[in-house]
Amino acid sequence: MDRYDMEDVVVPEQDGSSPLKEWRLKHQAGTLNRNDFIDYFKKESPKYFDFQNEMGTVKCMFKESLAKEEIIDVLVEFMLGDSPVTALEKLRLEGNTATVCGKVFKNGEPTYSCRECGVDPTCVLCVNCFKRSAHRFHRYKMSSSGGGGCCDCGDDEAWKRDQYCELHLANRKNPLESKIITSAVLERAEICFSAILAFCVNYLEIEPNASLQCLDGELDGANFCTVLYNDESHTFDQVINTLTKIAKCRHRDAMEIVAAIDREGRAVVKCDTFKECNELKTAIENQNIPPSGLLNNARHSQSLRTSVLNINSVACQQFALQLLSWFQEFLVRHYLFRKTFATLVQLKNESFCIRHILEYDVKLWKTARTCWHRLLISGMLMEYENKMVLAKEFSRRYATIVEDFISDDHDHSFSIVSLSVQLFTVPSIAHHLIAHEGIFDKLLHTFYHVAIEKFIHNRTLHFSKNIASMAFFKRANYILYDLRYLLSLKPEVLSSELRSGFLEGCKALMRVLNVMQGMESITRQMGQHMDYEPEWECAFNLHIKLASTISQVIEWAASDVKLLRKLYKMTVRALVNNSFIVGNEKVEAKVVADHVANCLIYDVSTRPVSIHLPLSRFYAGIYLHLGAHDMTYDILLAETEALNIKLTPREIIEPVLCTQAMIAQVAAGMWRRNGYSLLHQLYFYRNVRCRVEMLDRDIVCLQIGASLMESNEFLIHLLNKFNMIAWAQPEYEFGLAQSPVDDEFMRQLSMTDEFLELLIVIIGERWMPGVSLVSEEDRLRKEIIQLLCTKSYSHSELSRALPDGNSGSNDSIIEDVINTVAVFKKPVGTDSKGVYELKEHLYDEFNVYFYHYTKEDKSKAEELQRERRKAKKQLVCCPPPMLPQLTPAFTSMANILQCNVFLEITTMVMDRALDARSRSFTESHLQKVLHLLGFAIQEEISEHYPFLSFYERSQKYYVLEKLEELARCPRLEAHRDFVLWTIKRYKDLQAKQAPSVSSSSAAAGSGSSQQQSQQGEDQPLSSEQQARLEKEARSRLAAERRAKIMAQIENAQKSFMKSNAEMFANTNDEGTAGAAQKPNDSMMEWEEIPESLEEQGAAALVPDTCKTVACLGPQRSHYEAGDNSFKCILCFEDCSITSSGPPLVSSAFVQTSRVIFTTAIPEGPKSALHVSCCGHVMHHNCWKEYYSSEESKEQRRPQRNRVLPNQTQNVEFHCPYCRTLSNTVLPVSEALPKFSPPPPPSLTQAAENYMPLDSFVEMLLMISKLTLEGSSIALMNLPKKFSIIGNMSQFERSAQIIQKPTLHINWTEVMGSFHTALRNAMQSQLQGHQSEDSPNADDSDLDTVSLLWDTCYYTLQSLEVYLYAIQKPLKAELPMRHQSCVSNLVRACALYSVSLKEPQITKQSVQGAKLCETIFNQKGTSVLEWDCFRMLVQLNFTVPNLVAADVHGTICNQFLFTENKTMLPSGSMFDYYILQTCFLANITKAIICFDYEAEVASRSDEDKEKQLTAMLQYVEQLPTKIRHNMASFYVKHNLAFGVRQFERNGQPREEYEEMDMEMGVSALLDDPVKCLAQLLEYVRRQMSSFLRSSCLFYRCITDIDFPDSFPTDQPDRFGLMCQYLGLDPQLGVYFDMESVYAPIMQSFASHPHIRRELNERCAIKQATPGSSQAHSNTISIVPCQRPLPRLVTLYEDYSDLINSVSDIFCPNNEREEMKTPTMCLICGTILCGQSYCCQPELGKTAVGACTHHAHDCGAEVGIFLRIRDCQVVYLGRGKGCFVQPPYLDEYGETDQGLRRGNPLRLCKAAYDRIFLQWLGHNLHEEIARLNEHANVAVTQWHHM
């Protein structure tokens, strides 16, 4: 018994007064205070704490239910003045619940946000509110909570509309006051609440002073506990090792303790005396835990956290936790309770004031923290005014709380800091805090001091390469998340307080940006490589976290003129004061094309540069918004100059220009020695996550420079920074002629490319609001068009490739924009995704030099574009698109396109292109210059800028003439089309600008173009036209050459005929005659063929006995030997199968399986073995060599892949040819008829030539009896036996007795290894419950032999089921793996059955005898309990041994069998009789189980109707006698009929059975003909599975192929299958009493079990529905046609599925919800996946719940759906893999881990694919295939 049970079941009343009375009396007297309650809690709580020491481990429990009854309920009664149950019920009925939901989310709970109505993405609903809200019909998003958040239903500020669900909307009507909660109640509640809070605050601490308060002088005795606390720096395994080593716990207990610590934050590890406990604490703390590679952080080196507490103290703490949880639920009940609570916690001097609760959070463990957080959420966040109070307190304490959080090591969701998301995302509260509490400034100030101050050197940030600091830096980054929440919603109008509060924050931001400007700067490595890769990730992490804040600040400023102006000046001041790159550099004048510019000299290749320039970029962001408020640079310049701050355009662009120059130099290969860190930085610079505030802003910054500076000057600055001033001089070429071609020279060419590309980007990339007259949507549209020009994107790829917007509404904008530019193509097939394709007309907007393209994107897009244009017969090139119009502030940028330096550069490149000797030119230079000229021409055509006169100026530079010359230059053929396009556009411009000029020039013939047109031929051709001409020329040449060769051949023929004239003379006339006849002949043949086919077709309809193909029976077809030559896949030699030659094998895979038994009957077999095989053949010896190398490889593997190998497991390997998973080999044998040829047809046709069926049955019964009773009686029965066998030759012919086949010695070895594989597989299935010595059982074990037959049966049956599921008839083309697998397996079994050893034969014959007794002698089970196909296979392989063994044991040895004679199952008459017997058994079973009424009720489709009509006609034609026999058999044996008769007559059947059946039968049936027709139709349907399996089986045994009459695309037909098996398809035959069939069926049907079953059913009917009649004797009926195995039916909508498990608790811990609920898709059980709490044992090892479940449910393989992650897992033996889940969103994509959160629906095709992989036994194969890749992460699958 528990320690306190005796005394505590009823709390004794002390001195006859209960605490309740005491409190009431004191209260009346006015002396009651909170200490009375606290003392009571302290005194009572230890009574409910209990522990037991067992096996060195302590088990503690706190009896919560008792404590609630005895303490909490008393408290409630005191407060409410009534019994708790009734009082709370009255309160509930009064209906005053909150209008805000406030449900606190647990970790992993599903949450829903609405994309249309949510104010930001943090606004979420819980399941219950979501189901009842309007948002479920909107575009919602699912995700799973990280824990700690709460539901926002009812919060007006969280939603744009539909703020309330139906439930909370109803609550708004309720009054706030209450009749039950009077002022007296509230007065009492106040005292109780303060007591509860004081007690909890006092007791809940990790190092509590409370422990001392509980001592009360008890220092001796086992009254102390050692408590171990959770931390995030030690792994599970480390703590488990510590506990097993130091606390001496068992491993299993240690795991439980660790799971508890992880769950609750602490656990008691020992209860003992203070000395013992303290020693353990010291030992644990002193233990040195080796660091693990995975976790390395600041706390890592610290020891585990422990403390020693008094037991009473632990009890008080446990009670305090219970009290807090109850208190939180209690507060939710009424507004007035919450009001009281809020008033109490605002009392400044109390120990439980808000300030203290916030600050002491860090001293608590996990559960205690969670309880306090929930209490604050329920008590303070439901009402707005309380929320504001909490927010203010939180803001004032923010710095302290965050510093505590950073030094603490609990996850963010367990820290009080996580409350920020509840407070800072409420817009009105956020704005209040910025305006009145200075929170914006405080956050950044805290961040600056806590996170980055220590890394500042020389006024710039440089992070150290110390991993420990990274952990703390990551924690500090949460401040930036909070900042993002604060600014997420900009107000419509800024009040002056808000503005000044915001500007204070901006000052702090400037301070941070200032130290970031130029951080992690790098210098080019000249002589040697970097010593070590510098730290770069921290800087980028900082950037990524800050980027959205920067964008938000710019957005806020854009909407308010005053704010914008002040912020602009602040930024300018910061830039002027920052000396990175622009401080005191010397200036030099540079000249290009007679223009001079004073350039700053800063050599990028030798001095530090940085990718991080947030200040310059912030300036660019602010500048873009000036135009909207009519401010310009010049106006503001005047204002700032008054403050003595001057920022020139040259200084604005300089830092950015240096960065661009550095990027160009990296591309030119000048920075190779700087290692990977630089390449990583450049990758992120362009990456979608960073580029908005990096690359994009840099280009804007350069565009600002271009618009503010004189165009020539700007270009000279650019040239100077790229070191290309010399290149731009005309005499550059002469200087080059002398210098050698070295690296430097190649770099210069590359730099020219980079310079031209940058120029294209500055001019062309203007889809930016503020630069051009475009909106944010246009910018997005451009981005999407450019992306879709590279390839078709799926929806998820597209959203990943676009930058995140700051507001959550971004999603819907993106959707709208996508739909305007692209068409969505639905997915085809299960593997493909739906993709977006760009609308055709938008390809014209493609820009090949788009600045977000990587090099690969660019080449891909260019290739696609060229192919498209080629297909449309346009010029094959990528011309520049039309550009949008610039805003007034940027208009002067267009001037670049006509300035002298620009024209000088472009013409210079064209000149160098035309000069064959030029060395400073590459073709890409020309392409870029043409692109720039295209821009210039199009800009002037657009007429946006009146000052643009490119056409006039270009004439001075003879641009057109140079272009025409380029078009004729053969060296530049690749760019000819682009040149032609440029000429065409230029002429369009010419026609527009100077129509008179162009016409007059045409008339006067000025220049070369006129002469060209006269010559006509000289006009340059486009590449498409040229290609066409070339093709024509090629085909003309080919035709000429062909004609020439033909002529040569003809000549040769003629000369040959001349030289051999006499030979041709006599054949000539025959030849001519033949030739004349020939055409006619062929016509005749064509006409004849269809006729013969028609005849055949007509004949095929009439079953002609001599034409039908049968594989068994008297009409058996002749066997034709097939081809049996192969190529060994290992040595590539040709090989063929011979019985005596070296054996050939094929790799096979044996697995335990329950697939067919999923819908099984309870008593049936639990699992069976299945063999699959790929069919590739190899020599046994070759395979052995291959296998030994694979085996050694596999044995080296466990260290690497951590799969625990089992001694009995088969070593897995892959087929050397096709990599199919295998674990054994199957012998490849010859066809069985080769060993045992059937007698010639002349003998088998006549009935008297073989033994009849009844003699066969009698013989078997006789032999079985002999075998079972022993040979002593055998001699007496000899004469009887001979009389049965009768004619000996008849017997030999029927049994096909042959010489024992001689098989190669290795063949038996192969079979032996195959056996072992089977036994191992079975063994590993029974792993948990096996005896020690069983693995070494003898090879000749009986079970193994029968196991072989069962494996054969199961494999064939599963193949039949699989073919049925995929609707493939037998004749359809079977894959080689199925074909070769079944034929090799059946042949191997048959040959093995005749080559058994003596003891095996004896055991087999005993088993065969038992089988025969069961079948023919009613001993054992009845026909209802048989699986007839299984019987068939077993009989086929045991009867030969039964007969042979018997004959060996008798004297007739000499007549019949000599030692080496035997029977081989190969289609003999015996095999035929066995089939007939099982066929009859199945018919009998079908008749007994038929239910006429159910059948009539279930009529449905017209196919069935047609068949029924045909069957009615057949029944009417039957002779009356047979019809009567059929009816009487039905009436006599059918169960359903018997039960109905019983209901009618009230007496069991036996009593009227004896009546004269003549009159009885037809009277008993209402409509005999219809009933019999239904019956026969039912029987035919029920036989289908048996017949299909039998066809497969006998096809392998006899090697006679299915006839052509079998359908290939429709279901198999009953009649055709019966004909093939030699059975009579007319069912009437089997009811003819003259025949041998009817008595056999009678014997099957009259089994006592069947009678008993009928009586049972009648008894159940008789029993009144209320009474439970015991029916333990009912038999388990195996249906004739097993239902098709199915996986679990899943919900259509994924959210229904995820909601269905939202309240499921872990089976081992009622308080904890399942973290990873996982559904078994085979049976539907919900398990706790991948957690330490549920680890049952399998064999000797602890495994995860899913592994354990899969072992039984799916026989070692399982399919699991991890519900919250939407992942499907295949779990095999110690291995597993994730596969695509069956839930897809509207775009045809899966969402594993719910990252995108789109609503998901069940996709039938995807689920079918999983189903078919399971049904086809391919799961192990799939797991192996997906684990082949080296990059698969190592997962400890067995813990799942």
Image (cartoon, rainbow, N blue to C red):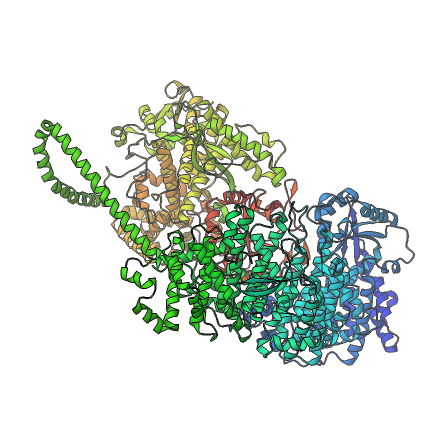
User: Percent x, y for residue 1076?
Assistant: 9, 40
Name the quadrant containing residue 463: bottom right
Residue 144 makes an appearance in the image: no
Q: Residue furthest top?
A: 1454
User: Percent x, y for residue 1794?
Assistant: 57, 59
Seen in the picture, residue 928 relative to 1209 is either above or below; the reply is below
- Total labels drawn: 0
Name the quadrant containing residue 380: bottom right
Seen in the picture, residue 835 relative to 808 is either above or below; the reply is above
User: Percent x, y for residue 1073?
Assistant: 8, 36
In this rendered view, identify the residue nearer to me: 807 or 915. 915
User: Percent x, y for residue 1168?
Assistant: 50, 40
In this rendered view, identify the residue nearer to me: 1428 or 509. 509
Q: Residue furthest right?
A: 217
Q: Is 1144 left or right of 251, judged from the image as shown?
A: left
Q: Is 286 left or right of 1353, judged from the image as shown?
A: right
Seen in the picture, residue 1629 relative to 1401 is either above or below; the reply is below
The residue lying at 35 percent from left, 60 percent from top is 874
In this rendered view, identify the residue nearer to me: 1669 or 1637. 1637
Residue 925 makes an appearance in the image: yes
Name the quadrant containing residue 725: bottom right
In this rendered view, identify the residue nearer to me: 1113 or 1496. 1113
